[in-house]
Each structure stands twice: as C-alpha cells, then as structure tokens.
Image (cartoon, rainbow, N blue to C red):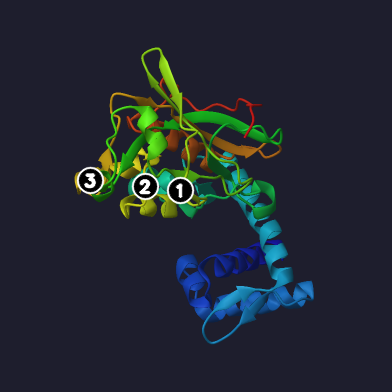
Amino acid sequence: MALDRLEAMRAFCRIVEVGSFGGAAESLGLAKTTVSGQIQALEVLLGMKLLHRTTRKVSPTTEGSAYYLRARAVLDDVDDLEASVSMNRSIVRGRIRIEMPPAVGLSLVVPALRDFTAKYPETHLDVGCSDRVVDLVEEGIDCSIRGGVVSDPNLVCKVIGRVQLALCASPNYLKESPGLSSPEDLLVHKNLGYRFSANNRRYLPQMFRGHDSFSLDVPVSMYFNNGGAYTAAAVAGLGIAFLPRAEAQQYFAKGMLEEVLTDWTLESIPLSLVYPHTRHLSARVRAFADWVTTLMRDDPCWRLERENSQYDESHNTTNH
C-alpha cells in the first residue's frame, strides 16, 4: 500500500508540473488510464479533490496545491534516501527547482543546461527566471541564485559569481544627445533608473578609474523594476543604462547598443547561490550548485574577481 501511495503521489506531482494527464503518463512511462486511476484512488483515500479537470487543461485545487508541496518534498526525500544507499552513489536523480534573475538565466544558465542534463540525465529541472525575491520554503524552491548581498538568517548563502556591468546607450540616442566624455556629463543626459521590485529601492552603482570614483546618483528620466524592460528601454533609445555585460554583448555585436565611458569601470554585483538553512543539501542540488559555480568561474562576464571554484555551505550574514 505504501509503494502504491508513493506511485500515486509521483503521478499527481507530475500532472501538476506538466499540466496534463497525458504528459505525466508519458514522462512516467505509464498508460494514461493507469495515471488516471492512481489519481482517482488518491483522491478517494484523502477524501478531497486534488485537481480541476477541463477539456483544455488540468490544474490543482487549493487543497491540491498544498498537498503538492508536501508530496513533492516527500518524494524528493525518498529519491535522496535511495541515492544515499544505492550501490552506485554517483547517480544523481530527482527534481531540482531553481529560481534565478532573468539575465543570469537567459545569458548564462539556460544556454548551457544541455551540458548539465547530459551529465545528470535522471534529473528533472524546474527553472524559474524572475526579478522577484521568492520565498524558498513557502514555494518549494530547492535553491536560488540571487543578485546583491544576502542577509536572511534562514538561508545558507555562498557568493559564486558577479554580474559585470556596462554603461551603454543606443547609437540613435547618442547621435541626438550632448557629448559624453566624463561621468559628470551624465548630469545633462537622460538616464534610465532601476529599482528592485521587492522593496522599490533604487540601485546606484559606483564607477571607478584608478583612484577616482563616481556614483551614478544622477537625474533619472525613467525608472524600471524589470530587467527585460530596462534593457528594452536602452535599446529603444530612451536613455543611458547600466546593463549586465553578458546581456549587452549581443546588442553591441548587432550595433543596437554602444558602450560609453569605457575608460571607467562599473562596480559588479555579487551573485549568490542560496538555499534554506533548515534543509539538507541533497545530492542533486549540490550537483547543480557545483555545476553553476564552475560555469560562472569559466566566464569572464560572471566570474569572481577572487576565484572560489568550490561550492561550500558557508552562512553569509550580509544585507540583501
């Protein structure tokens, strides 16, 4: 009975994750009728409806969403237990839920994920890319890559890379605007500002050249709290922006953006991998942590100034 219940829980979780009975059945290697029967039996056993079923989609009920989070955690623990006692402990399997900023996901992690899945074919990735700061425990996220410094005492934190920034604008904007040869010239330009969506706090990076420094605390013509919109505004010629260099490079190559004040260096933003302090770091999450740490170490747009290639479980208490 226990094994049947676990199989039914696994089928239910796959339905929630892929959004259909057919997709879940295919991924589990089962007949659709078998999966449907497992869910019906599970709902009878629990005495509650777990899924809303329509001809177009399947979604969890309120009770189903709550059950999913607990069931997913149970299944992940079972996968970890089996891996720990397996004769072949090098096998990494199970689902990994990851959250990261869009710039990191689109410019670095997602293009390289084929290498990770080839190395760990028995893992199933659930990748979220957003600017918001997620609650890892409440939302069932295994780990997150976060920009800025992190202070939450409930999180284990390790800085694994840095976002290298570039100050840039579109050629059309620069053609129609005053000259730009020193940071002070920014005072008469249209500057695009960025605010963190979590707290609406404005981000003000510093610029450096030798012993000189300059804060980008300059008049702002427009604010954005989404990285994609901020980049689009710069490309559209709305003003000058500081963008992740890895993201801006494609626009430099196409002539859609130009880097300005290149004799100055913008400070970089630390990137940390975090996970709940109360949660055991499973083999699959450690595998991802080690992989993404190496990925950043090997890329000049993301690597730490002082390399630290080995992920460890240090607890950082700086402020987010």
Among the two numbered marks 1 and 3 on one chain, the one whose residue lies closer to the N terminus: 3
Q: Residue at x 69, y 52 (%)?
A: 138
Q: CA distance from mark 1 to mark 3?
A: 18 Å
| Residue 90 in picture, x, y percent from top left | 46, 38
| Residue 54 in picture, x, y percent from top left | 58, 85
Q: Quadrant of the N terminus?
A: bottom right
Amino acid type of the residue tagged 2 in the rendering: Gly
Of 296 and 318, nearer the camera is 318
Left or right: residue 190 versus residue 68 is left
Q: Residue at x 65, y 65 (%)?
A: 9
Q: Which residue is mark 1?
A: 221
Amino acid type of the residue tagged 3 in the rendering: Lys
Q: CA distance from mark 1 to mark 2?
A: 8 Å
Q: Quadrant of the C terminus?
A: top right
Q: CA distance from mark 2 to mark 3?
A: 12 Å
| Residue 83 in picture, x, y percent from top left | 56, 43
Residue 175: give its label: 3
Amino acid type of the residue tagged 1 in the rendering: Ser
Residue 239: give its label: 2
Of 145 and 294, nearer the camera is 145
Quadrant of the rendered structure where residue 104 is? top left
Label 1 neighbour load within 10 Å: few <14, some 14-19, many 20+:
few
Q: Are marks 1 and 2 in contact (CB under 8 Å)?
A: yes
Of 37 and 116, nearer the camera is 116
Among the two numbered marks 1 and 2 on one chain, the one whose residue lies closer to the N terminus: 1
